[in-house]
Amino acid sequence: MTSATAPPPRDGYGLGVAPRTVDAASKAILDAAGELLASEGIEALTVRRIAAAAGGSTMNVYSRFGGKDGVIEGLLIDGFRRLGDAMESTRTTSSPLADLRRCAEKYREFALANPTHYDLMFGSKKFEQPQTPALGAVAARALNMLADRLERAMDAGLLQRRDPLLTAQMVWSACHGPVSLEMRGVGPPGTGWQEVQRQLIAALLNGLKANK
């Protein structure tokens, strides 16, 4: 693999503001915050609401996560981990380009199935989270997986030999653009965003094909 190696996650949940103890209460806090995010949106993520939904006190949130920012970082890490899992769930086959297209499909499926979580990860300005080493590592994992699959296509002579990580960022951008527009209702009614993404990925991969 020639793409950058991500730094290892920290102990516990791998949070920059890590829970001091990894126990049932810590998991309950993250689970409750995730449910609030899914049902009521980003604005519901206050320490008081998270603590009440988890069935504990606000002190539990502060003692385990340092406050709201630590919980939000946990949600971001969980989101990037699940996005990476979704893309990685597409097994590698004898067709590296088809594998890449399926990764793009899984990206879109994750975003549409988890709209508030995806908005927290990519679209929200309400909580601007500094990128800690732990958060950077889990986000890099998904990007590096794309880079590995692109490098496999390059090794097979299907794509031009170029920086796999930079090329992975291009593919990620082509995945992110259409689904973000779709989720925000941009464009004329009835726009087939799934087809838009499919055609965009196909055009990108076609432009990257190795010269025969």
Image (tube, rainbow, N blue to C red):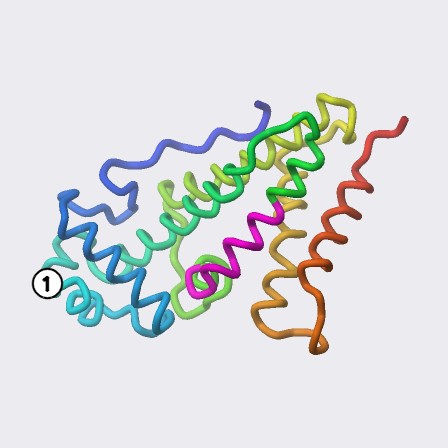
Residue 174: image location, x then y, percent: 67, 52
The number of numbered discs placed on residues in the rendered structure image is 1
The rendered magenta stretch, by its main secondary structure, is classed as: helix
Image quarter where the N terminus lies is top right
Label 1: which residue?
Answer: 56
Q: Residue at x 23, y 46 (%)?
A: 18
Residue 29 placement: quadrant: bottom left
Nearer the observer, 112 or 166? 112
- Give the residue displayed 19% in from the left and 47% down from the top: 19
Is 103 colored magenta in this rendering?
Answer: no
Residue placed farthest to the bottom in the image? 189
Question: Is residue 103 depicted above or below 109 in this figure?
Answer: above
Q: Is residue 143 left or right of residue 81?
A: right
Q: Position of residue 14 (x, y in %)?
A: 29, 41
- Left-right relation of 36 to 90: left
Which amino acid type corresponds to the residue marked 1 in the rendered image?
Gly
- Rendered view: 209 above or below 108: above
- Dividing the picture into quadrants, the one containing residue 195 is bottom right
- The residue shown at (54%, 54%) is 109
Q: Is residue 97 shown left or right of residue 2?
A: right
Q: Quadrant of residue 197?
A: bottom right
Q: Where, quadrant-wise, is the C terminus in this rendering?
A: top right
Q: Secondary structure at mark 1?
A: loop
Question: x, y (%) of residue 60?
Answer: 11, 58
Relative vertical location of residue 188 with respect to residue 13 in this rendering, above or below = below
The percent position of residue 181, horizontal first and vertical second, equals 63, 67
Residue at 34 percent of width and 66 percent of height: 37
Q: Residues within 10 Å of mark 1 (few under 14, many from 20)?
A: some
State the extent of the magenta-drawn residues as a range.
104-117
